[in-house]
Image (tube, coloured by chain):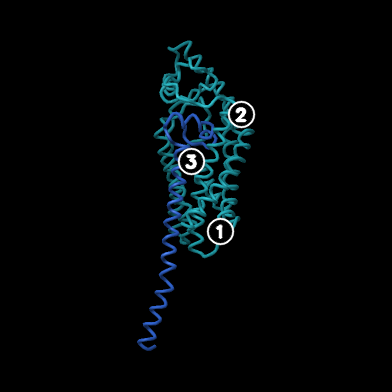
Amino acid sequence: MGTFRSIVFASVISGFIVGLVVTLVQQFGTVPLILKAEVFEKAAQTHQHDAPVAAQPAAAGHDHATHDHGDHEHGAGDHEHGAGAWEPRDGFERNAYTAAANILTAIGFALLLAGFFAVRTGATGMSVSWHEGLLWGLAGFAVFTLAPGLGLPPELPGVPAAPLLSRQIWWLAAVLATAGGLAMIAFRRSVPAAMSGVILLTLPHLIGAPELANVETNVPSSLTHQFVTAVTVTSLVFWTLLGGLTSAVFARFDQRA
Amino acid sequence: MSQSQLAHAAQTSTQAALPVAAGQVGRLSQALMAMVLGLFVVGMVGFSNIDVVHNAAHDVRHSNAFPCH
């Protein structure tokens, strides 16, 4: 199990470092925007509570049915989010879980990258350099952030969206089509393959992501725009760092194994 | 090339080829195993519908633009 061990060790080390770095970056980028949006979200919920017959049936239905994270500042008395599912308290506890989730996400994606590095090393007989790893990281950025983000832009809490399952399916389809399209272009050097690759890249966007007919939210659009930028730039840092670091660490373990 | 030389050549090439092939298969299956594990981890953190997991990873889901509630 030499290869598997090298992959796992390299992924855990790189994922841990990248997860911590990204948690730090998020504290200045995305997290303040999420907290700001939650103020609007809660104001809207209170408003709906005061006037239950108010308009926005679609948005309200969405909030009540599937939206169960918003009571970070509320006590047990918050009727909106019945069931009383556990959630971290604001401040240190919430950030600690965010850090843990970031580290796990980074380890998960590092396992994926290092798996490719192992296959590439086996095929070419040369270990993947940090530079090639960085390019793989950029591919991950295109596959997991740029492509799905075109149809489903990063969304703030309190902004209603199409049903969750339909968005998850489209997200997954966009990821698979983009990965396949890029692979066709990168690894098959023929014109028909390149053309099918480009078609694969555009296909999910021709089909179109699920969206609501009209979105009513009191979260300001400037906040949403800032969030899209913050998420995309943070993700770029995440993927380039993860690609470069995982390839370098994996190459070291793989040589010794 | 004589018969025996041919046989010898075939034998050495099999000997040379087999361990490499076996190594490649082992490497591929181990790499695939790691990749499936990685996707499982990302899927749990980013897509699990369990409330507790959702609430713990809430800010990360939003920050990674995973579809969230």
Colour used to depict chain A in the structure image = cyan
Q: Residue furthest left?
A: B3
Above-or-below relation of A107 to A188: above
Which element is circle 1 on?
Answer: loop
Chain that is coloured blue in the picture: B
Q: Which residue is mark 3?
A: A148
Q: Which mark is residue A32?
A: 2
Q: Amino acid at mark 3?
A: Pro
Q: Could you classify mark 2 by the number of other residues whose Cα lies within 10 Å: few (under 14), some (14-19), or many (20 or more)? A: few
Along the line of sight, which residue is nearer the eye, A47 or A198? A47
**Chain label for disc 3:** A
- Label 1 or label 3, whichever lies nearer to me, is 1
Q: Which residue is mark 1?
A: A128
Residue under the image location 45 percent in, 59 percent down: B27
Q: Are marks 2 and 3 on the same chain?
A: yes
Relative height, residue B69 to residue A5 (above, below): above
Which amino acid, mark 2? Pro
Instruction: For mark 2, give the secondary structure.
Output: helix
Q: Is residue B42 above or below residue A44?
A: below
Q: Earlier in the sequence, mark 2 or mark 3?
A: 2
Distance, label 2 to label 1, CA atoms, is: 37 Å
N-terminal of the two: label 2 or label 1? 2
